[in-house]
Image (cartoon, rainbow, N blue to C red):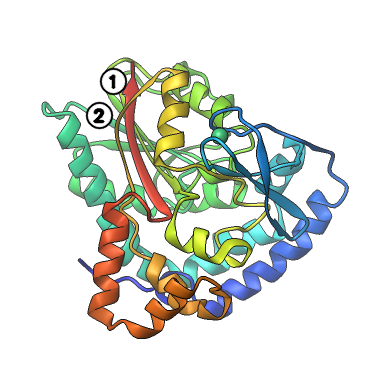
Amino acid sequence: MMKVTEEEIRPEKVFSEYLELTKKDVTVFFGNAKREEIACPACGGEGQKWADKSGFNYKKCDACLSIYVSPRPHKEAFDAYYTDSPSTKFWATTFYKITEAARREKLWKPKAQLIKDKISQFEEDNKIKYIIDIGGGYGVFDEEIRLIMDIMPIIIEPSVHLANVCRQRGLKVIEKFMEDISPEELPVGRKCYVSFELFEHLHDPGLFLKTVLDNMNADDLFIFTTLSGMGLDIQVLGEHAKALSPPHHLNFLNPKSITQLLNSIGFEVLDADTPGKLDVDILKNNKQYIKDEFWKNTIQYSSESELNSIQQFISQSGLSSHMMITCRKF
Ligand SMILES: [Zn+2]
């Protein structure tokens, strides 16, 4: 297992600058936005207040333990923010450029391999022709996957800045939100839809999944990663978890609640696990915020190799904050 640290992929200094810009954007784009109470996005249940952050309230569902922002600002505010704002521009230009080399090696190369393995696990005849990368960002995954698979990646990316970066790399981009794409805009042939770290951002996760389902054919696959609210670092750090970062992260489902949601929409879930590697490292970097005695002391008491074993156990038990779902149409 290649060692990945939080600092390599989220250098403290640059990340803080990004958070500063985000804070200003929150005021500009969400200060006067209309907000509405919503039910649990996974099961429709009722939630209780779980944390407050930057003027956003997070609730936790009594029934399925999903964590979600409610009341939730209206969609228009998010659309304007993601299409063109100073902090998304900073992310697409400065932040990604500085961290790209490390991210390519430590995140995207292994992820491309993981996706290739997942595809061959569920598609023995390997007839996938296209990878449809929803919210493809900087296109690094797509560059990496086309090196190791005989497929053509197509990126769906609504941000002007990110779409431009992808085009400059010679990647095919459709500059739209997934919700606005009709099936005939995509080529005919077997597809694997993917989306990485997108689901937690979605204003209406159920609507997004329905859109993907409607776009898919019976033999297509959909593989996506997102944050799990049952993840170790999120549970232990609560409001201090950096993952709780409005306006970006609105939905923290978990392997069980997301399976329930996918089934209700018409997906068959082939796999829902948490291959995350960073939880313990995140706890170490934020130990001043840990209130729970067990975790506070465990982080101080354990050796590197013991901490590695704990991380492996957490991942294998479905309790890492980084989860990966593989599904197809029922
Ligand atoms: Zn729920």
The N terminus, quarter of image: bottom left
Q: Quadrant of residue 28?
A: bottom right
Residue at 28 percent of width and 83 percent of height: 303
Relative image position of residue 38 (x, y in whole percent) = 71, 33
Q: Nearer the viewer, residue 3 or 135?
A: 3
Residue at 46 percent of width and 20 percent of height: 264
Q: Disc 2 on helix, strand or loop?
A: loop
**Mark on residue 189?**
1
**Mark on residue 175?**
none
Q: Is residue 310 visible?
A: yes
Q: Is residue 81 above or below residue 175?
A: below
Q: Quadrant of ligand 1?
A: top right
Mark 1: amino acid:
Gly
The C terminus, quarter of image: top left
* Marks 1,2: beta carbons within 8 A: yes
> Mark 1 or 2 closer to N-term?
2
**Mark on residue 129?**
2
Relative image position of residue 46 (x, y in whole percent) = 65, 34
